[in-house]
């Protein structure tokens, strides 16, 4: 998935958060709604300017961002 075509950042739009091109719909909003159990169809109904491809681009963008992150072991939930 070529998310670069769909996701933009502009300091004048939503404070520079990544958004779907041509909208003010943020990637984090899409991810939050999907994580809460909404379906892609739910998102498309609530946001008529979205497309399924745009939602998938938001997911691909999230994967790309996480892949670039440095992950550090966490001691949360482990015995001391």
Image: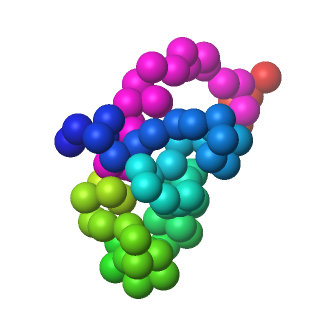
- Residue 67 lies in the magenta stretch: yes
78 and 37: which one is in front? 37
* Quarter location, residue 5: top left
Residue at position x 47%, y 65% from top? 34
Q: Is residue 14 above or below residue 50?
A: above
Residue at position x 25%, y 58% from top? 53
Percent position of residue 2, x then y: 23, 38
- Residue 46 lies in the magenta stretch: no
30 and 26: which one is in front? 26
Overall secondary structure of the magenta stretch?
helix
Q: Which residues are magenta?
A: 57-76
**In the image, farthest residue toward the left:** 1
Specify whether residue 35 is in view: no
16 displayed left or right of 5: right
Percent position of residue 28, x then y: 57, 51
Q: Count all numbered tags in the image, as a single digit.
A: 0
Percent position of residue 35, x then y: 51, 62
Percent position of residue 9, x then y: 53, 37
* Quarter location, residue 45: bottom left
Residue at position x 62%, y 46% from top? 13
């Amino acid at each position: 998935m070529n998310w670069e075509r769909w996701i933009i950042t502009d300091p004048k739009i939503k404070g520079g958060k990544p958004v779907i091109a041509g909208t003010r719909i943020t990637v984090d909003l899409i991810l939050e709604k999907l994580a809460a159990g909404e379906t892609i169809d739910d998102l498309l109904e609530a946001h008529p300017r979205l497309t399924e491809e745009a939602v998938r681009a938001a997911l691909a963008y999230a994967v790309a961002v996480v892949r670039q992150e440095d992950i550090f072991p966490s001691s949360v939930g482990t015995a001391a």
